[in-house]
Amino acid sequence: MRKFAVCLLIVAPLCAADFWQAKPYTEWSEKNVKKMLDDSPWARPVNIAGDLVPPRTGGGKRGLGARGSMTEIGNPNEVTPDPMGDAPRSGVGRSAQNADPDRGTAPMLTFTVRWESALPVKQARVRARYGSEAGTSPEARRILETEEKNYLITVSGLPANTLRGDAQEIKTQAIADAALTVKGQDPIKPIDFMLRRVNGDTIAVFAFPRTIPLTLDDKEVEFRAKFASIPVKLRFALKNMIFAGKLEL
């Protein structure tokens, strides 16, 4: 009985481990991938009541929502192999129009804020994209081995008719409204911004400089951004973002 009890004590913690700690990404199931991309320490959904009304701007370069193709703004991922290129819809947020027109209530918008530069998120991306070849594909290996110069944070779930107008104005305003904040420190401002379309979904990409490092001593970091009239704020507990023994952002 004593030996059996010892075995239980050893096995129980292993059974309780999160899948990203318990098994390699090459063994993650579709459900595991969706969990990592949708609702994990690195990806969090946020529901906001509001109505995204596109700003009225003058002419110039077309932004998102203009007739024709979307104008990509900035390029935070310029030198990084792109794991989102043809990724499936799993993990992409959406806006749920739950408004009651008779009562005049605003729709409930659902966004997903995700640290795309974090290794476990990149692993989920390549697992979704390359499937059983995720561990052997040279391109997948190149994506995972590329050292990110910046923290790349995406916000998905933006309605397609938002943020239309002059591309440079959209970029300037998005950078001005966004920040990473840690208690007692100056806000970290993004150095670049872009809008993308992936499988029909609209995604905002922010690049924050790693030259201002985040550490476990910071305990918590808050991401904030604003799209039209809707502010997006979300806090991440850094102690939960440990992967393979290190803080992964």
Image: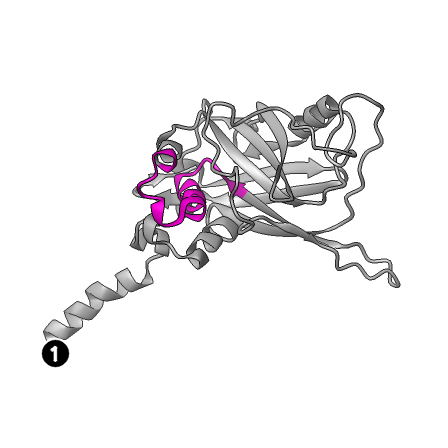
Residue on which the image places disc 1: 1
17 shown above or below 113: below
220 left or right, relative to 159: left
Residue 83 in the image: state x and y as whole percent. 47, 37
Residue 48 in the image: above or below residue 79: below
Estimate the x, y position of residue 217 in percent, counting from the top left.
40, 37
- On-image quarter of the C terminus: top left
Q: In which quarter of the image is residue 8?
A: bottom left
Callout 1 crowding tier (Cα within 10 Å): few <14, some 14–19, many ≥20: few
Q: Magenta span covers which residues?
A: 114-140
Is residue 181 one of those drawn in magenta? no
> How many dots with numbers?
1
Name the image colouring.
Answer: one colour
In reply to whether residue 138 is colored magenta, the answer given is yes
Which residue is at the far bottom?
1
Image quarter of residue 248: top left
Q: Main secondary structure of the magenta part?
A: helix
Q: Locate residue 20, reporting x and y percent.
A: 36, 51
Q: What element carries label 1?
A: loop
Residue 39 at x, y percent in the picture: 51, 53
> In the image, what residue occupies the spot 55% across and 33% down?
180
Residue drawn where x is 37% and y is 44% of the image: 242
Which quarter of the rendering shows the N terminus? bottom left
Q: Is 220 displayed left or right of 197 in the figure?
A: left
